[in-house]
Image (cartoon, helix red, strand yellow):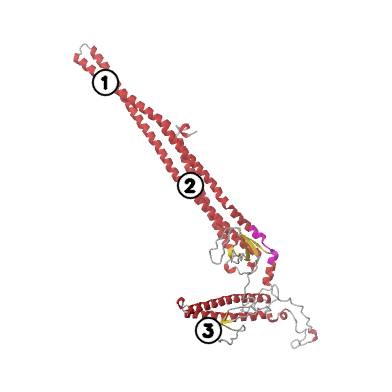
Protein backbone atom coordinates (compact mmCIF):
# COMPACT_ATOMS: atom_id res chain seq x y z
CA UNK A 1 0.00 0.00 0.00
CA UNK A 2 1.10 3.53 -0.70
CA UNK A 3 0.09 6.98 0.37
CA UNK A 4 -0.98 8.07 -3.12
CA UNK A 5 -3.71 5.44 -3.20
CA UNK A 6 -4.79 5.10 0.41
CA UNK A 7 -4.25 8.67 1.60
CA UNK A 8 -5.20 10.56 -1.57
CA UNK A 9 -7.41 12.96 0.39
CA UNK A 10 -5.15 13.38 3.49
CA UNK A 11 -2.78 16.11 2.37
CA UNK A 12 -2.76 17.88 5.75
CA UNK A 13 -2.14 14.62 7.61
CA UNK A 14 0.80 13.78 5.34
CA UNK A 15 2.23 17.27 5.70
CA UNK A 16 1.97 17.11 9.49
CA UNK A 17 3.42 13.59 9.68
CA UNK A 18 6.49 14.37 7.59
CA UNK A 19 7.18 17.51 9.63
CA UNK A 20 6.85 15.51 12.84
CA UNK A 21 9.41 13.01 11.49
CA UNK A 22 11.93 15.76 10.80
CA UNK A 23 11.35 17.16 14.27
CA UNK A 24 12.15 13.72 15.70
CA UNK A 25 15.47 13.59 13.83
CA UNK A 26 16.35 17.04 15.12
CA UNK A 27 15.41 16.05 18.64
CA UNK A 28 17.60 12.92 18.44
CA UNK A 29 20.57 14.97 17.22
CA UNK A 30 20.20 17.30 20.21
CA UNK A 31 19.97 14.28 22.52
CA UNK A 32 23.20 12.75 21.15
CA UNK A 33 24.94 16.12 21.32
CA UNK A 34 24.09 16.45 25.01
CA UNK A 35 25.30 12.88 25.52
CA UNK A 36 28.67 13.77 23.95
CA UNK A 37 28.95 16.76 26.27
CA UNK A 38 28.35 14.46 29.23
CA UNK A 39 31.04 12.06 27.95
CA UNK A 40 33.52 14.89 27.43
CA UNK A 41 32.89 16.32 30.90
CA UNK A 42 33.15 12.83 32.39
CA UNK A 43 36.47 12.21 30.61
CA UNK A 44 37.78 15.59 31.69
CA UNK A 45 36.86 14.93 35.31
CA UNK A 46 38.52 11.49 35.15
CA UNK A 47 41.71 12.99 33.75
CA UNK A 48 41.76 15.70 36.39
CA UNK A 49 41.16 13.08 39.07
CA UNK A 50 44.04 10.93 37.81
CA UNK A 51 46.28 13.97 37.58
CA UNK A 52 45.32 15.09 41.09
CA UNK A 53 46.29 11.81 42.71
CA UNK A 54 49.20 10.91 40.43
CA UNK A 55 52.66 11.29 41.87
CA UNK A 56 54.61 14.36 40.86
CA UNK A 57 57.92 13.87 39.08
CA UNK A 58 59.76 15.39 42.01
CA UNK A 59 58.18 12.81 44.33
CA UNK A 60 59.04 9.69 42.31
CA UNK A 61 62.20 9.13 44.33
CA UNK A 62 60.24 8.93 47.57
CA UNK A 63 60.69 5.62 49.43
CA UNK A 64 56.99 4.73 49.16
CA UNK A 65 57.22 4.69 45.36
CA UNK A 66 58.97 1.32 45.50
CA UNK A 67 56.10 -0.36 47.34
CA UNK A 68 53.92 -2.65 45.22
CA UNK A 69 50.76 -1.18 46.73
CA UNK A 70 51.92 2.29 45.69
CA UNK A 71 52.89 1.11 42.21
CA UNK A 72 49.50 -0.60 41.87
CA UNK A 73 47.76 2.65 42.71
CA UNK A 74 49.81 4.47 40.06
CA UNK A 75 48.88 1.75 37.56
CA UNK A 76 45.21 2.28 38.41
CA UNK A 77 45.58 6.03 37.82
CA UNK A 78 47.24 5.35 34.45
CA UNK A 79 44.46 2.94 33.48
CA UNK A 80 41.84 5.50 34.49
CA UNK A 81 43.59 8.05 32.31
CA UNK A 82 43.42 5.60 29.38
CA UNK A 83 39.78 4.91 30.23
CA UNK A 84 39.09 8.65 30.07
CA UNK A 85 40.65 8.68 26.62
CA UNK A 86 38.19 6.04 25.45
CA UNK A 87 35.27 8.09 26.78
CA UNK A 88 36.59 11.04 24.77
CA UNK A 89 36.76 8.77 21.72
CA UNK A 90 33.12 7.79 22.23
CA UNK A 91 32.11 11.46 22.34
CA UNK A 92 34.15 12.29 19.26
CA UNK A 93 32.76 9.39 17.20
CA UNK A 94 29.17 10.14 18.23
CA UNK A 95 29.60 13.77 17.25
CA UNK A 96 31.12 12.91 13.86
CA UNK A 97 29.05 9.84 12.88
CA UNK A 98 25.68 10.82 14.34
CA UNK A 99 25.31 14.53 15.06
CA UNK A 100 27.16 15.98 12.08
CA UNK A 101 25.96 13.37 9.56
CA UNK A 102 22.33 13.50 10.68
CA UNK A 103 22.33 17.29 10.74
CA UNK A 104 23.59 17.39 7.16
CA UNK A 105 21.06 14.74 6.11
CA UNK A 106 18.27 16.63 7.89
CA UNK A 107 18.94 19.75 5.83
CA UNK A 108 18.80 17.73 2.62
CA UNK A 109 15.51 16.06 3.59
CA UNK A 110 13.95 19.38 4.58
CA UNK A 111 14.78 20.84 1.19
CA UNK A 112 13.44 17.77 -0.62
CA UNK A 113 10.20 17.83 1.37
CA UNK A 114 9.79 21.54 0.65
CA UNK A 115 10.12 20.85 -3.08
CA UNK A 116 7.41 18.16 -3.01
CA UNK A 117 5.01 20.33 -1.04
CA UNK A 118 5.53 23.19 -3.46
CA UNK A 119 4.70 20.82 -6.37
CA UNK A 120 1.51 19.79 -4.56
CA UNK A 121 0.50 23.39 -3.98
CA UNK A 122 1.22 24.27 -7.60
CA UNK A 123 -0.97 21.39 -8.82
CA UNK A 124 -3.71 22.50 -6.43
CA UNK A 125 -3.49 26.08 -7.70
CA UNK A 126 -3.74 24.92 -11.33
CA UNK A 127 -6.84 22.87 -10.55
CA UNK A 128 -8.42 25.77 -8.67
CA UNK A 129 -7.70 28.12 -11.60
CA UNK A 130 -9.39 25.72 -14.02
CA UNK A 131 -12.36 25.43 -11.72
CA UNK A 132 -12.70 29.22 -11.57
CA UNK A 133 -12.76 29.34 -15.35
CA UNK A 134 -15.42 26.61 -15.37
CA UNK A 135 -17.53 28.42 -12.80
CA UNK A 136 -17.27 31.69 -14.74
CA UNK A 137 -18.27 29.95 -17.99
CA UNK A 138 -21.17 28.25 -16.25
CA UNK A 139 -22.51 31.50 -14.80
CA UNK A 140 -22.19 33.27 -18.17
CA UNK A 141 -24.04 30.44 -19.89
CA UNK A 142 -26.80 30.63 -17.28
CA UNK A 143 -27.08 34.39 -17.68
CA UNK A 144 -27.12 34.38 -21.48
CA UNK A 145 -29.66 31.56 -21.65
CA UNK A 146 -32.07 33.45 -19.45
CA UNK A 147 -31.58 36.55 -21.60
CA UNK A 148 -32.33 34.44 -24.69
CA UNK A 149 -35.52 33.08 -23.12
CA UNK A 150 -36.72 36.57 -22.29
CA UNK A 151 -35.91 37.76 -25.80
CA UNK A 152 -37.85 34.83 -27.30
CA UNK A 153 -40.84 35.51 -25.08
CA UNK A 154 -40.74 39.21 -26.02
CA UNK A 155 -40.59 38.39 -29.75
CA UNK A 156 -43.55 36.04 -29.43
CA UNK A 157 -45.53 38.59 -27.48
CA UNK A 158 -44.72 41.30 -30.03
CA UNK A 159 -45.75 39.03 -32.90
CA UNK A 160 -49.15 38.47 -31.27
CA UNK A 161 -49.65 42.13 -30.49
CA UNK A 162 -52.08 43.58 -33.14
CA UNK A 163 -50.86 47.06 -32.47
CA UNK A 164 -47.21 46.16 -33.19
CA UNK A 165 -45.83 47.07 -36.55
CA UNK A 166 -44.12 44.64 -38.84
CA UNK A 167 -40.80 46.36 -38.14
CA UNK A 168 -41.24 45.93 -34.39
CA UNK A 169 -41.99 42.25 -34.85
CA UNK A 170 -38.96 41.75 -37.10
CA UNK A 171 -36.67 43.58 -34.68
CA UNK A 172 -37.86 41.49 -31.72
CA UNK A 173 -37.30 38.26 -33.65
CA UNK A 174 -33.78 39.31 -34.66
CA UNK A 175 -32.99 40.17 -31.03
CA UNK A 176 -34.31 36.81 -29.86
CA UNK A 177 -32.25 35.00 -32.54
CA UNK A 178 -29.09 36.87 -31.55
CA UNK A 179 -29.61 36.07 -27.85
CA UNK A 180 -30.18 32.44 -28.65
CA UNK A 181 -26.94 32.34 -30.69
CA UNK A 182 -24.95 33.92 -27.86
CA UNK A 183 -26.48 31.50 -25.36
CA UNK A 184 -25.51 28.59 -27.61
CA UNK A 185 -21.90 29.78 -27.77
CA UNK A 186 -21.82 30.13 -23.96
CA UNK A 187 -23.22 26.63 -23.70
CA UNK A 188 -20.49 25.25 -25.91
CA UNK A 189 -17.82 27.18 -23.95
CA UNK A 190 -19.20 25.89 -20.68
CA UNK A 191 -19.16 22.33 -22.01
CA UNK A 192 -15.55 22.74 -23.13
CA UNK A 193 -14.51 24.19 -19.76
CA UNK A 194 -16.30 21.42 -17.95
CA UNK A 195 -14.54 18.79 -20.03
CA UNK A 196 -11.18 20.49 -19.41
CA UNK A 197 -11.76 20.70 -15.65
CA UNK A 198 -12.85 17.09 -15.38
CA UNK A 199 -9.76 15.98 -17.25
CA UNK A 200 -7.44 18.06 -15.04
CA UNK A 201 -9.26 16.95 -11.90
CA UNK A 202 -8.82 13.32 -12.85
CA UNK A 203 -5.15 13.93 -13.58
CA UNK A 204 -4.77 15.77 -10.26
CA UNK A 205 -6.35 13.03 -8.10
CA UNK A 206 -5.10 9.99 -10.01
CA UNK A 207 -1.67 11.11 -11.21
CA UNK A 208 -0.18 14.34 -9.84
CA UNK A 209 -1.03 14.08 -6.15
CA UNK A 210 -0.49 10.28 -5.85
CA UNK A 211 2.97 10.74 -7.37
CA UNK A 212 3.80 13.55 -4.94
CA UNK A 213 2.41 11.59 -1.98
CA UNK A 214 4.44 8.55 -2.97
CA UNK A 215 7.58 10.70 -3.16
CA UNK A 216 6.83 11.99 0.32
CA UNK A 217 6.30 8.41 1.49
CA UNK A 218 9.69 7.37 0.05
CA UNK A 219 11.33 10.39 1.70
CA UNK A 220 9.76 9.56 5.05
CA UNK A 221 10.76 5.91 4.88
CA UNK A 222 14.34 6.89 4.02
CA UNK A 223 14.31 9.26 6.98
CA UNK A 224 13.14 6.44 9.26
CA UNK A 225 15.86 4.09 7.99
CA UNK A 226 18.55 6.74 8.48
CA UNK A 227 17.27 7.49 11.97
CA UNK A 228 17.34 3.77 12.78
CA UNK A 229 20.98 3.67 11.67
CA UNK A 230 21.64 6.59 14.01
CA UNK A 231 20.05 4.59 16.83
CA UNK A 232 22.34 1.64 16.07
CA UNK A 233 25.41 3.87 15.91
CA UNK A 234 24.57 5.14 19.38
CA UNK A 235 25.19 1.63 20.65
CA UNK A 236 27.87 0.50 18.19
CA UNK A 237 30.06 3.52 18.95
CA UNK A 238 30.38 2.43 22.55
CA UNK A 239 30.64 -1.26 21.67
CA UNK A 240 33.61 -0.48 19.46
CA UNK A 241 35.72 0.76 22.38
CA UNK A 242 34.44 -1.76 24.92
CA UNK A 243 37.35 -4.19 24.30
CA UNK A 244 39.87 -1.44 25.10
CA UNK A 245 37.80 -0.32 28.09
CA UNK A 246 37.74 -3.96 29.17
CA UNK A 247 41.53 -4.08 28.96
CA UNK A 248 41.72 -0.92 31.08
CA UNK A 249 39.54 -2.59 33.69
CA UNK A 250 41.62 -5.76 33.44
CA UNK A 251 44.69 -3.59 34.02
CA UNK A 252 43.09 -2.25 37.19
CA UNK A 253 42.36 -5.81 38.34
CA UNK A 254 45.91 -6.83 37.48
CA UNK A 255 47.23 -3.90 39.50
CA UNK A 256 45.24 -5.12 42.48
CA UNK A 257 46.52 -8.67 42.18
CA UNK A 258 50.12 -7.48 41.74
CA UNK A 259 50.24 -6.09 45.27
CA UNK A 260 52.64 -8.18 47.37
CA UNK A 261 52.44 -7.33 51.02
CA UNK A 262 55.48 -9.48 51.90
CA UNK A 263 57.57 -7.77 49.24
CA UNK A 264 56.48 -4.36 50.53
CA UNK A 265 57.68 -5.32 53.99
CA UNK A 266 61.04 -6.38 52.57
CA UNK A 267 61.31 -3.10 50.65
CA UNK A 268 60.61 -1.15 53.83
CA UNK A 269 63.35 -3.11 55.62
CA UNK A 270 65.77 -2.58 52.75
CA UNK A 271 65.12 1.16 52.67
CA UNK A 272 65.21 1.86 56.39
CA UNK A 273 67.51 -0.75 57.96
CA UNK A 274 70.02 1.26 59.98
CA UNK A 275 72.67 -1.41 60.55
CA UNK A 276 72.96 -0.56 64.26
CA UNK A 277 73.08 -3.25 66.91
CA UNK A 278 70.47 -3.20 69.64
CA UNK A 279 71.78 -1.58 72.85
CA UNK A 280 73.05 -3.98 75.48
CA UNK A 281 72.20 -4.17 79.18
CA UNK A 282 73.33 -1.35 81.42
CA UNK A 283 75.83 -2.26 84.11
CA UNK A 284 75.06 -1.74 87.76
CA UNK A 285 76.68 1.33 89.29
CA UNK A 286 77.29 0.75 92.99
CA UNK A 287 77.28 4.16 94.65
CA UNK A 288 77.53 2.55 98.11
CA UNK A 289 81.16 1.53 97.56
CA UNK A 290 82.38 5.16 97.41
CA UNK A 291 84.06 4.57 94.13
CA UNK A 292 85.26 7.72 92.44
CA UNK A 293 83.24 7.54 89.27
CA UNK A 294 84.99 10.52 87.77
CA UNK A 295 88.40 8.81 87.73
CA UNK A 296 87.50 5.12 87.66
CA UNK A 297 87.98 3.04 84.54
CA UNK A 298 85.90 0.12 85.81
CA UNK A 299 82.67 -1.00 84.31
CA UNK A 300 80.81 0.46 87.29
CA UNK A 301 81.75 4.01 86.38
CA UNK A 302 81.55 3.57 82.59
CA UNK A 303 78.14 2.19 81.74
CA UNK A 304 77.86 0.68 78.31
CA UNK A 305 74.47 2.00 77.39
CA UNK A 306 73.04 3.04 74.05
CA UNK A 307 75.26 6.08 73.72
CA UNK A 308 78.44 4.03 74.18
CA UNK A 309 77.40 1.46 71.62
CA UNK A 310 76.97 4.01 68.88
CA UNK A 311 80.66 4.78 68.50
CA UNK A 312 81.00 7.69 66.11
CA UNK A 313 77.20 7.90 65.96
CA UNK A 314 77.07 8.80 69.65
CA UNK A 315 74.70 11.65 69.00
CA UNK A 316 71.98 9.31 67.76
CA UNK A 317 68.88 8.97 69.91
CA UNK A 318 67.91 5.33 70.42
CA UNK A 319 64.66 5.96 72.26
CA UNK A 320 62.12 4.50 69.82
CA UNK A 321 59.24 6.87 70.46
CA UNK A 322 61.13 10.13 70.80
CA UNK A 323 60.40 12.72 68.14
CA UNK A 324 63.38 12.74 65.79
CA UNK A 325 64.72 16.03 64.57
CA UNK A 326 65.59 16.37 60.88
CA UNK A 327 69.34 15.69 60.49
CA UNK A 328 71.69 18.01 58.66
CA UNK A 329 72.45 16.51 55.26
CA UNK A 330 76.18 16.00 54.64
CA UNK A 331 78.01 15.18 51.43
CA UNK A 332 79.43 11.91 52.79
CA UNK A 333 75.96 10.90 54.13
CA UNK A 334 77.24 10.52 57.72
CA UNK A 335 73.84 11.82 58.83
CA UNK A 336 72.39 8.44 57.77
CA UNK A 337 72.55 5.10 59.58
CA UNK A 338 75.44 2.86 58.48
CA UNK A 339 73.44 0.61 56.17
CA UNK A 340 71.62 3.47 54.48
CA UNK A 341 74.85 5.47 54.21
CA UNK A 342 76.58 2.59 52.44
CA UNK A 343 73.74 2.29 49.91
CA UNK A 344 73.64 6.01 49.19
CA UNK A 345 77.42 6.13 48.72
CA UNK A 346 77.29 3.12 46.41
CA UNK A 347 74.49 4.74 44.36
CA UNK A 348 76.36 8.05 44.14
CA UNK A 349 79.56 6.26 43.10
CA UNK A 350 77.71 4.39 40.33
CA UNK A 351 76.29 7.65 39.00
CA UNK A 352 79.78 9.18 38.85
CA UNK A 353 81.10 6.13 37.02
CA UNK A 354 78.39 6.44 34.35
CA UNK A 355 79.03 10.16 33.95
CA UNK A 356 82.76 9.55 33.75
CA UNK A 357 82.25 6.95 31.03
CA UNK A 358 80.25 9.47 28.97
CA UNK A 359 83.04 12.04 29.25
CA UNK A 360 85.61 9.39 28.25
CA UNK A 361 83.57 8.47 25.19
CA UNK A 362 83.27 12.15 24.34
CA UNK A 363 87.01 12.65 24.59
CA UNK A 364 87.71 9.69 22.32
CA UNK A 365 85.25 11.04 19.76
CA UNK A 366 86.90 14.46 19.86
CA UNK A 367 90.31 12.87 19.44
CA UNK A 368 89.18 10.92 16.39
CA UNK A 369 87.55 14.03 14.95
CA UNK A 370 90.78 15.98 15.43
CA UNK A 371 92.72 13.26 13.63
CA UNK A 372 90.28 13.47 10.73
CA UNK A 373 90.55 17.26 10.56
CA UNK A 374 94.36 17.10 10.59
CA UNK A 375 94.42 14.56 7.78
CA UNK A 376 91.64 16.30 5.83
CA UNK A 377 91.81 20.06 6.52
CA UNK A 378 88.93 20.72 4.12
CA UNK A 379 86.56 19.00 6.58
CA UNK A 380 87.33 21.31 9.49
CA UNK A 381 89.86 23.18 11.60
CA UNK A 382 91.51 21.02 14.33
CA UNK A 383 92.05 24.12 16.45
CA UNK A 384 88.28 24.58 16.73
CA UNK A 385 88.14 21.45 18.91
CA UNK A 386 90.75 22.63 21.42
CA UNK A 387 88.27 24.23 23.81
CA UNK A 388 86.02 21.16 23.80
CA UNK A 389 88.96 18.82 24.37
CA UNK A 390 90.20 20.97 27.26
CA UNK A 391 86.74 21.11 28.83
CA UNK A 392 86.28 17.35 28.48
CA UNK A 393 89.70 16.73 30.06
CA UNK A 394 88.84 18.98 33.00
CA UNK A 395 85.53 17.16 33.46
CA UNK A 396 87.28 13.80 33.53
CA UNK A 397 89.80 15.04 36.12
CA UNK A 398 86.98 16.45 38.26
CA UNK A 399 84.92 13.25 38.06
CA UNK A 400 87.99 11.12 38.82
CA UNK A 401 88.63 13.15 41.94
CA UNK A 402 85.00 12.80 43.03
CA UNK A 403 85.13 9.07 42.32
CA UNK A 404 88.21 8.63 44.50
CA UNK A 405 86.54 10.64 47.26
CA UNK A 406 83.39 8.48 47.23
CA UNK A 407 85.49 5.29 46.93
CA UNK A 408 87.25 6.29 50.16
CA UNK A 409 83.98 7.06 51.97
CA UNK A 410 82.47 3.82 50.71
CA UNK A 411 85.44 1.86 52.09
CA UNK A 412 85.02 3.62 55.44
CA UNK A 413 81.33 2.69 55.45
CA UNK A 414 82.16 -0.98 55.02
CA UNK A 415 81.26 -1.21 51.36
CA UNK A 416 83.39 -2.81 48.62
CA UNK A 417 84.47 -0.16 46.21
CA UNK A 418 85.46 -1.60 42.85
CA UNK A 419 89.04 -0.60 42.03
CA UNK A 420 89.11 1.63 39.01
CA UNK A 421 91.86 1.02 36.52
CA UNK A 422 92.37 3.26 33.58
CA UNK A 423 94.71 4.07 30.74
CA UNK A 424 95.59 7.66 30.04
CA UNK A 425 95.21 9.07 26.55
CA UNK A 426 96.84 12.29 25.50
CA UNK A 427 96.89 14.17 22.27
CA UNK A 428 100.39 14.76 20.90
CA UNK A 429 101.29 17.49 18.54
CA UNK A 430 100.21 15.39 15.58
CA UNK A 431 96.76 14.78 17.00
CA UNK A 432 97.41 11.04 17.63
CA UNK A 433 96.94 9.30 20.98
CA UNK A 434 99.80 8.34 23.31
CA UNK A 435 98.93 5.56 25.73
CA UNK A 436 100.38 5.49 29.22
CA UNK A 437 100.67 2.68 31.70
CA UNK A 438 97.61 1.51 33.68
CA UNK A 439 98.76 3.09 36.93
CA UNK A 440 98.79 6.55 35.46
CA UNK A 441 102.58 6.95 35.04
CA UNK A 442 103.90 8.15 31.70
CA UNK A 443 105.66 5.63 29.50
CA UNK A 444 109.19 6.07 28.31
CA UNK A 445 108.21 6.49 24.69
CA UNK A 446 106.42 9.81 25.09
CA UNK A 447 105.73 12.43 27.71
CA UNK A 448 102.37 14.09 27.00
CA UNK A 449 100.99 17.05 28.93
CA UNK A 450 99.20 15.77 32.03
CA UNK A 451 96.54 18.48 31.68
CA UNK A 452 95.35 16.68 28.55
CA UNK A 453 95.19 13.22 30.06
CA UNK A 454 91.94 11.50 29.28
CA UNK A 455 90.99 8.47 31.28
CA UNK A 456 89.13 6.44 28.76
CA UNK A 457 89.07 2.78 29.71
CA UNK A 458 87.86 0.87 32.68
CA UNK A 459 88.70 -2.67 33.56
CA UNK A 460 86.40 -5.43 34.73
CA UNK A 461 83.02 -3.87 35.64
CA UNK A 462 83.38 -0.78 33.46
CA UNK A 463 85.32 -1.84 30.37
CA UNK A 464 82.68 -4.08 28.78
CA UNK A 465 79.25 -3.26 30.15
CA UNK A 466 77.02 -6.31 29.98
CA UNK A 467 73.34 -6.13 29.13
CA UNK A 468 71.09 -6.01 32.19
CA UNK A 469 69.36 -9.30 32.93
CA UNK A 470 65.63 -9.23 32.07
CA UNK A 471 63.24 -9.03 35.01
CA UNK A 472 60.22 -10.28 33.08
CA UNK A 473 58.50 -10.50 29.71
CA UNK A 474 55.68 -8.60 28.03
CA UNK A 475 53.34 -9.02 25.06
CA UNK A 476 52.21 -5.95 23.10
CA UNK A 477 48.44 -5.39 23.17
CA UNK A 478 48.55 -2.54 20.64
CA UNK A 479 50.84 -1.15 17.98
CA UNK A 480 53.22 1.55 19.19
CA UNK A 481 55.24 3.64 16.67
CA UNK A 482 58.07 4.60 19.05
CA UNK A 483 58.59 7.89 17.25
CA UNK A 484 59.99 9.93 20.15
CA UNK A 485 63.54 9.72 21.45
CA UNK A 486 64.23 6.90 23.89
CA UNK A 487 61.19 4.84 22.87
CA UNK A 488 61.05 1.64 20.81
CA UNK A 489 58.40 0.57 18.32
CA UNK A 490 56.40 -2.63 18.72
CA UNK A 491 53.66 -4.52 16.93
CA UNK A 492 50.55 -6.02 18.50
CA UNK A 493 51.31 -9.53 19.75
CA UNK A 494 55.11 -9.00 19.77
CA UNK A 495 56.93 -10.48 22.79
CA UNK A 496 59.72 -8.47 24.43
CA UNK A 497 61.97 -8.73 27.49
CA UNK A 498 61.38 -6.35 30.40
CA UNK A 499 64.65 -4.88 31.68
CA UNK A 500 63.25 -2.04 33.82
CA UNK A 501 59.81 -1.82 35.42
CA UNK A 502 57.40 1.07 35.46
CA UNK A 503 58.58 3.62 38.07
CA UNK A 504 55.23 5.37 38.23
CA UNK A 505 55.57 7.47 35.07
CA UNK A 506 53.64 5.03 32.85
CA UNK A 507 56.72 3.76 30.92
CA UNK A 508 58.51 0.39 30.93
CA UNK A 509 61.94 -0.32 29.42
CA UNK A 510 62.05 -3.40 27.17
CA UNK A 511 64.52 -5.19 24.91
CA UNK A 512 64.18 -7.14 21.67
CA UNK A 513 66.05 -10.33 20.87
CA UNK A 514 68.43 -8.34 18.66
CA UNK A 515 69.44 -6.17 21.62
CA UNK A 516 67.44 -3.04 20.75
CA UNK A 517 66.16 -1.33 23.91
CA UNK A 518 63.72 1.48 24.59
CA UNK A 519 60.64 2.56 26.50
CA UNK A 520 57.01 1.64 25.78
CA UNK A 521 53.75 2.75 27.46
CA UNK A 522 53.04 0.33 30.30
CA UNK A 523 49.32 0.23 29.45
CA UNK A 524 50.09 -0.95 25.90
CA UNK A 525 51.46 -4.33 26.97
CA UNK A 526 50.68 -7.29 29.22
CA UNK A 527 53.65 -7.53 31.57
CA UNK A 528 54.73 -10.63 33.51
CA UNK A 529 57.58 -10.18 35.98
CA UNK A 530 59.79 -13.04 37.14
CA UNK A 531 59.35 -14.07 40.76
Residue 215: % across, % down: 45, 37
Cα–Cα span, label 1 and label 2: 68 Å
Q: Is residue 500 visible?
A: no
Residue 262, magenta (yes or no): yes
Residue 102: % across, % down: 48, 47
Q: What stretch of residues is rendered in magenta?
A: 252-264
Read off the residue under disc 1: 179
Q: Nearer the viewer, residue 418 or 6?
A: 418
Residue 93, magenta (yes or no): no
Q: Secondary structure at mark 1?
A: helix
Q: Residue furthest right?
A: 289
| Callout 3 crowding tier (Cα within 10 Å): few <14, some 14–19, many ≥20 | some
Read off the residue under disc 3: 428
Left or right side of 124 for 410: right
Q: Which image quadrant for residue 132?
A: top left
Cα–Cα span, label 3 and label 1: 140 Å
Left or right side of 517 for 174: left
Q: Nearer the viewer, residue 229 or 272?
A: 229
Amino acid sequence: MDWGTELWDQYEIIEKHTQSGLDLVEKYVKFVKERTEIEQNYAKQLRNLSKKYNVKRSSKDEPDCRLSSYQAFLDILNEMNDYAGQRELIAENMMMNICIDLTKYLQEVKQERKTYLMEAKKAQQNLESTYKQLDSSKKRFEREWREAERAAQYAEKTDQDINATKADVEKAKQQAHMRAHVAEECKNDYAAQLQKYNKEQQHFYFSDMPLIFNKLQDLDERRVRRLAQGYNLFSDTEKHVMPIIGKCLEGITKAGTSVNERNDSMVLIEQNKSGFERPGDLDFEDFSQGINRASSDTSLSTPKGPMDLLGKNRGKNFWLFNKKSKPTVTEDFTHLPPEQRRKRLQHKRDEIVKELQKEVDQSEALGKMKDVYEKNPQMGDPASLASQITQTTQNIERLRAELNKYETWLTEAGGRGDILRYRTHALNNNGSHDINSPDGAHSDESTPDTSQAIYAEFDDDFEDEELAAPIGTCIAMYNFPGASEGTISMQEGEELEVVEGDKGDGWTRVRRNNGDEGYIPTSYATITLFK
